[in-house]
Amino acid sequence: MKFKGFNNHFKKYTGNKSLKEIEIFNNKSFQDLFIDIPIQHSIVNMDCNNDKNIDKLLSCENNYKIAKKLNWNNDIINKINHYKNIFIDDNTLGIHLRFTSMTVHNNIYGNVSFKDYIDKIKTYIEKYNIINLFIASDNNESIQKIKDELPNIKINYFDNFSKQTHEVQKNHNAIDFEIYNRVNNKESYTEVILDSIMLSKCKYLIYRVSSVSLLAILLGNNIKSECLNNNSRFI
């Protein structure tokens, strides 16, 4: 799907930089998180014929093997160890909240509301006696709403990571934010990787279609996960 005026949005935040220059910066930022990347293939080029089908993607043994071979640099490892001790216990429920620009894709991936999330979270809390959540979110509004709904549950998240203010942005502001953040925030790749890694340390995971959640599942060990998307292609 192409967004109307996307090129204008992109040029607005990249100035005179070419797309190639931005891609080089992005690739370098991502590679800086690793000591090395031993596998040259991307997940979508593995044995799965249809990378849009989550079941097929997660059923590919090669994807898990590749994820387990990722070799983080010492800075990332230190952050993992530090925040895991703060955020995660042996019965943590991980939540990946994705709204903002994802609402543009609801016709493709299916609509998911905050109520869908909170109802499922409450079900897991009751069923598995959960008292600790780790939340990776693209916006602050959703986090606050969960805190208001669950005042007796410990809720952890990276409060200094870049997030949008509201679940739904007007006039494509969500897209503006994502482009600006990727171009100008050199920590954006570290942030998303750390969110994924923390989710991977959780015992349970509630999510909607996202590479962040899929990476968490691939990095984790037998996470009990549940996708909220109501489009049958992704259930």
Image: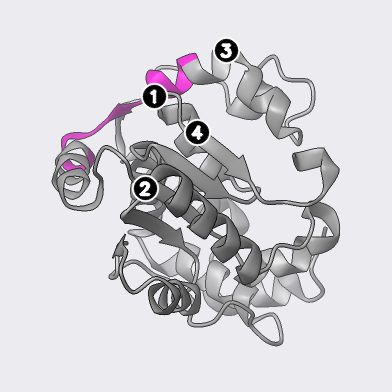
Q: Quadrant of the C terminus?
A: top right
Residue 223 visible somewhere in the drawing: yes
Q: Which residue is drawn at 53% across and 65% down?
A: 17
Residue on which the image places disc 4: 224
Helix, strand or loop under label 4: strand
Q: Earlier in the sequence, mark 3 or mark 1?
A: 1
Residue 131 on image: x %, y % = 31, 55
Nearer to us of marks 2 and 1 is: 2
Residue on which the image places disc 2: 129
In the shown orientation, is residue 104 left or right of residue 119?
right
Q: Which of marks 2 and 1 is nearer the N terminus?
A: 1
In the shown orientation, is residue 97 left or right of residue 55?
left
Badge number at residue 37: 1
Residue density around tag 2, few if under 14, some if 14–19, many if 20 or more, within 10 Å? few
Residue density around tag 4, few if under 14, some if 14–19, many if 20 or more, within 10 Å? few
Q: Distance between the residues labelled 4 and 3?
A: 17 Å
Residue on which the image places disc 3: 61
Q: How far apart are marks 1 and 4 (CA)?
A: 28 Å
Badge number at residue 86: none
Nearer to us of marks 3 and 1 is: 3
Q: Do the residues labelled 3 and 1 touch (CB within 8 Å)?
A: no
Instruction: Identify which amino acid the numbered label 1 is placed on.
Output: Ile
Residue furthest to the bottom: 170
Q: Earlier in the sequence, mark 3 or mark 2?
A: 3
| Residue stretch in magenta | 65-76
In the depicted structure, whether residue 200 falls above or below residue 131: above
Helix, strand or loop under label 1: loop
Residue density around tag 3, few if under 14, some if 14–19, many if 20 or more, within 10 Å? few
Residue 15 visible somewhere in the drawing: no
